[in-house]
Image (tube, rainbow, N blue to C red):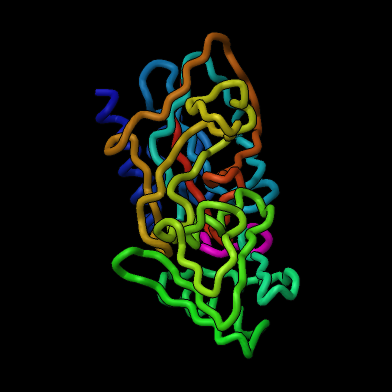
Amino acid sequence: MERILEYFIYLLYNMNSLNFNLPSTSSTATTSSNYNLPINLVQLAPRNRQYMLIDSKNRVSGTSTDFYYQFSTPVKLTNFIKLVYANIPNSEYLIKTGINDTFYINYNGGGEASITLTAGAFNSQNLTTLLQNAILTLYPSSGFSVSFDITTFKFTFSATNNFYFRFGTQTGNNLMNILGFANSQTSTANSITSDNAIYIISTPYVNIYIDQLSSNSNVITDKNIKSTFFVPITSERSIVDSYSELSMYENIIYFSSSLSFSGTQITLYDQYQNVFQNNGLPVNLLMIYE
């Protein structure tokens, strides 16, 4: 029966995402004055269970993926909190300003020079063009070319004279991973091929971190990743990625003592512990708690 009720709430939420206006029919439901979801707390569950729906558009401050949220009714957790549904637009760029947009090149022994790539979403084809144009802008007479092998999924960089790449210390150094290199500095040669297949998935998963629940964690890693709930990103870019506990797996935290709060900071992190950047599109989270 409980699972049926959760599915009903899930359907109710998705009806709202399609811009249905749903008038309140329950005296225990807390809705906005114009009867539109999202709501903060919905008391439709048995016993002391409640549903919490968070829409980052209704944040007090911050961005759509790193924000402070104030509840209209204080939250009191006595037993558990479970993520039932998450609606996360996959609009993050592959190349992000100040995070993975810069690398260094030493061409023909002339000393290192930095190259900064234009931020944006790229596939293997237009990333190849971006890289070649960026290098040729700096060294127009170098004969530089960049090619992508659709069989091995690797880049090959070629030039008239020897060169090497260095990827610097930007957070996570993930430009190195995107281009398929195993080390932060390549060997020196006039032709260099990626060590591994390129990695053009911007973010394979998101860690949702709720500050008020910081003493509780579902995920144990060796890199001190902040995570309250773990959500895989499985869709193509520009598509809304939806997590449903009914179709995936259970994201739940249990409490040994009660916890109360009226607001909290919520941050979505990528695999490198950078704030997940979905370029302003709203995030929606539906949780059940007791």
Is residue 264 toward the left or the right of residue 283 in the image? right
Is residue 60 toward the left or the right of residue 270 in the image? right
Q: Is residue 113 magenta?
A: no
Nearer-the-camera pick, 17 or 246:
246
Q: Give how far across and how far down residue 46 sits, in percent.
A: 36, 20
**21, above or below 161, in the image:** above
Residue at the outermost top position: 256
> Residue 44 lies in what quarter of the image?
top left
Nearer-the-camera pick, 210 or 270:
270
The residue at the point 69 percent across, 53 percent down is 169
The residue at the point 35 percent across, 49 percent down is 14
Determine if residue 161 is in view: yes
> Residue 43 lies in what quarter of the image?
top left
Nearer-the-camera pick, 70 or 176:
176
Q: Give how far across and how far down residue 148 sits, in percent.
A: 40, 73
Identify the main secondary structure in magenta. Answer: loop
Count of numbered marks? 0
Q: Give how far across and how far down residue 178 sits, in percent.
A: 49, 59
> Residue 279 lies in what quarter of the image?
bottom right
**242, above or below 110, in the image:** above
The residue at the point 36 percent across, 56 percent down is 235
**76, above or below 286, in the image:** above
Q: Give how far across and how far down residue 37 sits, in percent.
A: 46, 47
Determine if residue 58 is in view: no
Residue at the outermost right position: 111
Q: Is residue 97 magenta?
A: yes
* Quadrant containing the N terminus in the rendered view: top left
Residue stretch rendered in magenta on the structure: 90-99
Nearer-the-camera pick, 188 or 233:
188
